Amino acid sequence: MTWPNWRMWMAAAGVDNNFDDSRCVGFADSSYVVQAVVEGGAVGLADLDMIAGDLAQGRLVRLFDVGVRIAAPYAYHLVYPQGSEEDARVVAFRDWLLGEAGAPTA
């Protein structure tokens, strides 16, 4: 399974579970998806942060306001020893990392 995929997107868009993705083309690297879309040969799914520049410059257009949450196997997790969640170094690093990722701080 690649993330994001059309089956996940269709479910988020409210399209019934019978969506047939057998004719969808998949790429091993998301940069190939973006390249195919920029060249006009495809409609694709991509992480918005990855294509922000292309969207801002008008090379790509977001067709729908539908998003797919990142699947757990593809997520990153910050781990640290139990009991150290209030350690100033951990707090500083966590806050910095969340700020860089664009997520709200805890």
Image (cartoon, helix red, strand yellow):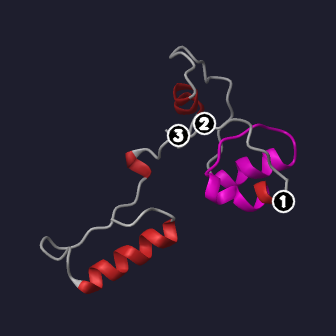
Identify whether 4 is placed above or below 20. Answer: below
Identify whether 105 is placed above or below 44. Answer: below
Q: Residues within 10 Å of mark 2 (few under 14, many from 20)?
A: few
Q: What residue type is labelled 3?
A: Val
Is residue 49 in the magenta section?
A: yes
* Cβ atoms under marks 2 and 3 closer than 8 Å: yes
Identity of the residue drawn at 61% across and 51% down = 47
Q: What residue type is labelled 2?
A: Val
Identity of the residue drawn at 73% across and 43% down = 62
Q: Residues within 10 Å of mark 3 (few under 14, many from 20)?
A: some
Query: Counting residues from the N terminus, which is met first, the one under dot 1 or under dot 3?
Result: 1
Marks 2/3: CA–CA distance? 7 Å
Identity of the residue drawn at 75% across and 62% down = 53
Estimate the x, y position of residue 40 in percent, counting from the top left.
Answer: 87, 42
Q: How crowded is mark 1: few (under 14 residues within 10 Å), some or many (20 or more)?
A: few
Marks 1/3: CA–CA distance? 23 Å
Magenta part of the protein: which range?
Answer: 29-54
Identity of the residue drawn at 65% across and 51% down = 30
Q: Mark 3 points at which residue?
A: 68
On screen, residue 22 versus residue 82, left or right, reads right
Q: Mark 2 points at which residue?
A: 66
Q: Which amino acid does label 1 sit on?
A: Gln
Estimate the x, y position of residue 69 in percent, counting from the top left.
Answer: 48, 43
Judged by its main secondary structure, the magenta piece is helix
Quadrant in which the C terminus is drawn: bottom left
Q: Name the residue under label 1.
A: 57
